[in-house]
Image (spheres, helix red, strand yellow):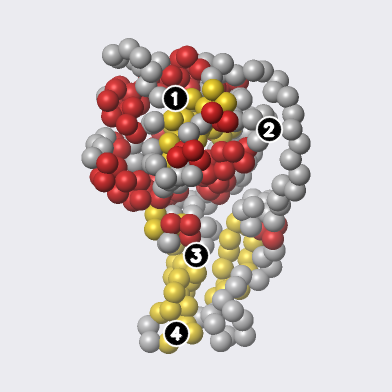
Amino acid sequence: MATIKKDGGRILPAAPQAHGAYGKDPKCLAYETYNLSTGAAETQYGSCRVSYRDAASGKCIEGIAKADGDDGDGVFLRVTNKSLPMGGKRKTEYKKVQAARVPKGDSIEDRPEEVATREEPFHWEMDSVLSAKEGNSKKRFLTMTERKSRADLMFLMPDGTMASVVAVLDMLETKLGSFNFRRIFRTITVDNGSEFQDWEGMTRAVTGGGDRTHIYYCHPYSAFERGSNENGNRMIRRRVPKGTDFTGITEADTLEVQRWVNEYPRGILGGRCAGRVLMELAQEAGIKGLELLL
């Protein structure tokens, strides 16, 4: 995939990665970099000049990657905390505020303990990722993160209305079947955004009557209560930076980013990929249908 400008409405290629020892010399590292003119992956060994895209500014920056023992520790020069996805920022204070609107559903305070402890799989967090504010597109991603595996599902919506969110859940229930939907999406935790205010529409089943899932609402301005989903959204922003106009983004682009996120090795999972962990959990529970979404 070609390299993409921040305002080009296209998806960025994966970031450069430094691989492990190559050949018989443990000090010789193989670096996989992206040629910014062709978008092709290139593998180089020892000291090499590389280009990468700064996470904060979206600008292309060049540096030198050095192997262990080559006057360095295998680092990219000119990389600071501001170049990291998190930018070194941490929330230091929490102030309790009153919600601008009172949600109709249950509060996160009423959520079962096994959901909070991640002992039981198939409990999800949900949010939306927006297009550029100055752009003309109303498109956005609906993102869902499974709490135990940290796997992500992404859906491209035409806008940020309550009807669009309900339409995605209706589509999932239709594709999976009501029985499988209830087993896969046991609970969903959301924030107080306007797109999530149709509690009845998100909860009620399309077929068979009754409820298909249970919706819980976070406290206002408490994104940390959906921490797994927030981390997933940050990973998505590595490929679709803030300021990207979603006009040209397609369903295929959305699926490509979802696969990249789910195939990314996670330290919290012991280096395993979230998508594989989720499929293993589904296999253990005898649940079928998730392969249609990943």
How many neighbours does mark 4 have within 10 angstroms: few (below 14), some (14-19), or many (20 or more)? Answer: few
How many neighbours does mark 3 have within 10 angstroms: few (below 14), some (14-19), or many (20 or more)? Answer: few
First in residue order: circle 3 vs circle 1: 3
First in residue order: circle 2 vs circle 3: 3
| Structural distance between the alpha carbons of marks 4 and 2 | 48 Å
Numbered label attached to residue 214: 1
**Residue lying at 42% horizontally and 45% vertically, measured from the top left:** 119
Task: Name above or below for residue 154 compared with residue 35.
Answer: above
First in residue order: circle 4 vs circle 2: 4
| Structural distance between the alpha carbons of marks 4 and 1 | 52 Å
Instruction: State the SS at label 3.
Output: strand
- Amino acid found under the numbered disc labelled 4: Pro
**Of the two numbered discs 4 and 2 in the rendering, the one whose residue sits closer to the viewer:** 2
Residue tagged 2: 221
| Structural distance between the alpha carbons of marks 2 and 1 | 21 Å
- Amino acid found under the numbered disc labelled 3: Gln
| Structural distance between the alpha carbons of marks 4 and 3 | 17 Å
**Residue lying at 30% horizontally and 14% vertically, measured from the top left:** 207
Residue tagged 4: 26
Numbered label attached to residue 17: 3
How many neighbours does mark 2 have within 10 angstroms: few (below 14), some (14-19), or many (20 or more)? Answer: some
Q: Are marks 2 and 3 in contact (CB under 8 Å)?
A: no
- The spot of residue 7 in percent (x, y) is 62, 40
- The spot of residue 64 in percent (x, y) is 61, 73
